[in-house]
Amino acid sequence: MLIRIPDYLTFVSLTQRASDTYAWQRNMFPISVLVEEVPLSLIEPYEVWIQQNQGIMQVYPSKIGDTTQRDILLSAPHKAFLEKSQNHVEIQKILSQIQDVLSNIKNNEVVLNCGGKSLRVGKYPRLMGIINVTPDSFSDGGINYRREVAVARAHQMAEEGADIIDIGGESSRPGSDPVDAHEEIKRVVPIIAQISKELDLPISIDTTKSEVARAALDAGAGMINDISGLHWDFKLAEVAAQYGVPVVIMHTRGKPKTMQQNVHYKSLFSEMIRYLKEGISMALSAGIPADQIVVDPGIGFGKSTEDNLRIMNGLFEFSVLGKPILLGASRKSFIGKTLNANVTQRLEGTLATTVFGVLRGASIIRVHDVKENYRALRMLKHMIDPSKAQGETSE
């Protein structure tokens, strides 16, 4: 059974500035909850429950031809979901799950322990600067492939406002070929070792391989960013737990070589959330603390342009997982296709995704152009909270 919060107004009501309203104080503001794969035996009891709580229930097929279960959309005052059902044990079990999901979307602040360097996320968005140490990166064409260039770029990103540096030695662009662990280590370890000594910023290793992650952590990295969401190499979770570092669990479907072939989802958000929940379960089983897990919807990984736009619009849905959300939309092809712009002309589109993504719940923004994104987020922060700009002059 999967529980989703598909209504954007619900998200706004639960997370924004409505605490001074009567409806908020009395928990009477409306809320919509989608519960998938509900047994037919519970449909009638739920109809009774929703009527008792002045709500509305809509019933949909779970799967074509499936006569054993249904998906139900429940719309009722928030208060109804917080109370216990005295008449039906199974409904109470589902209500308890709904209450857990609702508690997850409060966007609590957490501190990620990145190898002794702390990264506080949740209250204000953080910027992750991208350095691809590959000869075939989709965005920079291998410009940072040489060690001295990559190190200089890291220093520049730090000066421009990056909160963390993400270093990868294997291209994950659509159609790219895999790189063996030895080559990947040779590319990233010397750069990580030097940057970790020269900068007081956390460093993330972008890899799907446990051998690479271990070597990078030994060299000074403090976070693992896994595009496979721990689905390709379970030992990666064990390495993260052993070193006590956070892990980013991303959604993807298929390997980079073939991931853009036959892109189709029966239920986009449901399938993505299930995949991410599997990754979270693997992380917890390996011993990674719950507050050291970040999720990433994986913009561009096994998704169409329309899928990526839908994910941006519904990014808040991933808050039901109760983890900080990392957004990596920078320079992606869906921006290029939407704006008819090549990879060197996607800054404006990227800035739009950054600001929109934060407003939709993203806590970490992974970008190539740190300075410009930093300025956009600073402007957004002051518009949301003008008191933060006191003392600054204007002309």
Image (cartoon, grey):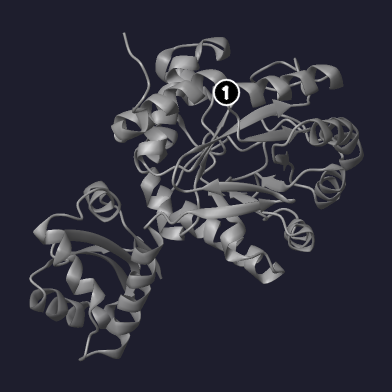
- Identified by mark 1, the residue type is Val
Which residue in the rendered view is the most extreme toward the front? 391
Name which quarter of the figure residue 275 lies in: bottom right
Frontmost residue, 212 versus 201: 201
Q: Is residue 189 above or below residue 40?
A: above
Q: Is residue 193 left or right of residue 177?
A: right
Instruction: Give the quadrant of the N terminus.
Output: bottom left
Q: Would you say residue 257 is visible in this rendering? A: no
Disc 1 target residue: 370
Q: Is residue 362 above or below residue 78?
A: above
Q: Is residue 290 above or below residue 7?
A: below
Name which quarter of the figure residue 65 lies in: bottom left
Q: Where is residue 359 in the image (x, y as percent from the top left)?
A: 35, 38
Q: Position of residue 202 (x, y in %)?
A: 70, 41
Q: Position of residue 384 (x, y in %)?
A: 30, 34
- The residue shown at (36%, 41%) is 360
Name which quarter of the figure residue 58 lies in: bottom left
Q: Where is residue 163 in the image (x, y as percent from the top left)?
A: 60, 35
Frontmost residue, 78 versus 374: 374
Q: In this view, does 135 lie to the left or right of 260?
A: right
Q: Is residue 348 above or below residue 313?
A: above
- The residue shown at (44%, 16%) is 348
Instruction: Give the quadrant of the C terminus.
Output: top left
Q: Would you say residue 335 is visible in this rendering? A: yes
**How packed is label 1: few (under 14 Cα within 10 Å), some, or many (20 or more)?**
many
Total number of numbered labels?
A: 1
- The residue shown at (47%, 33%) is 304
Could you tell me which secondary element the residue under label 1 belongs to? helix
- The residue shown at (61%, 52%) is 112
